[in-house]
Amino acid sequence: MGRVRVIPVLLLKNNGLYKTVKFKDPKYVGDPINAIKIFNDKEVDELCVLDINASAEKRKPNFKLIQEFASECFMPVCYGGGINTIEDAKHIFGLGIEKIALNNAAIENPQLITEIANIYGSQAVVVSMDYKKAFLGNNTVYAINGQNKTKFDVIDFVKRMEEFGAGEILLNSIERDGTLLGYDLETLKKVTEAVKVPVIACGGASNVNDFSLAVKQGGASAVAAGSMFVFQGKLRGVLINFPSQKELKEQVYF
């Protein structure tokens, strides 16, 4: 295996940067442009920016803000939130964004994945999939920022997304989100064994060892985190941070 991508996930709400715990209680952590500048200096591999309110509010992406992200970032950017049509996608790619993440749209209109992939390539389409365990222990996909339970089982869903042309899966555990308790390695492994496309582990990371476990035990092709990169210490003081390249080379880059 080559270099493993380590991806900060920034959550947008009302154009500010927030962090949630189990998709609830969003805490303001600062200005997204300032965070991007810091991550530039930290030599981050890739950045994922998700507008967590766009679909719930049934509004379009904030194209002006996205253009600012694209202009400021030195690394590739994946953007998700409010993308429902091929015109939305074309607009965002035209602003300089390298990848688009589809969540609710992937559930309601999976043909959009195919449309985007046919024009820009599968590598440009990421399906961002939020899930949690149902009463009987099965993993169920949720939509609209974790608010709406769908009929889809996680494994069936990822296979379906791959068939429609998704080039990557962002697998996000709602129950692990913001907890710093480590990734859901059991589900991660099931997903990585079920599809051939790269899977990004997300939800629960607290240190570089969690990254290593996601790759070695879970089969992840890349790792993502939120709280780990915006909080410091037990009291969760806001501090944008990123592991040193030395730490990553020792434990994560294989």
Image (cartoon, rainbow, N blue to C red):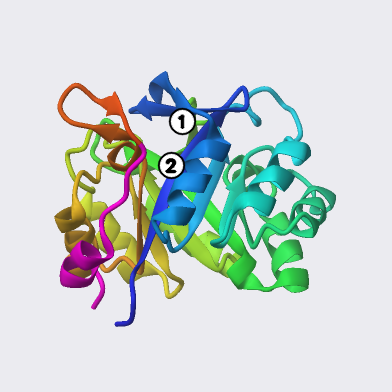
Q: Is residue 183 left or right of residue 201?
A: left
Is 149 or 52 nearer to us in this picture? 52
Q: Which residue is mark 1?
A: 146
Q: Outermost residue, front direction?
A: 41
Is 93 or 122 nearer to us in this picture? 93
- The alpha-carbon separation of the residues under discs 2 and 1 comes to 7 Å
Q: Amino acid at mark 1?
A: Gly
Q: Is residue 175 visible?
A: no
As for residue 164 lying within the magenta part, the answer is no
Q: How many marks?
A: 2
Q: Is residue 23 left or right of residue 81?
A: left
The quarter of the picture where residue 218 lies is bottom left
Pinpoint residue 140: horizontal percent, then vertical percent: 39, 41
Q: Which residues are magenta?
A: 240-254
Per the rendering, the mark at residue 130 is: 2
Q: Amino acid at mark 2?
A: Asp
Q: Earlier in the sequence, mark 2 or mark 1?
A: 2
Residue at left offset 48%, top offset 54%: 40
- Considering only vertical position in the picture, is 231 above or below 106? above
Q: Outermost residue, top direction?
A: 25
The answer to the question of whether label 2 and label 1 lie on touching residues, with beta carbons closer than 8 A, is yes
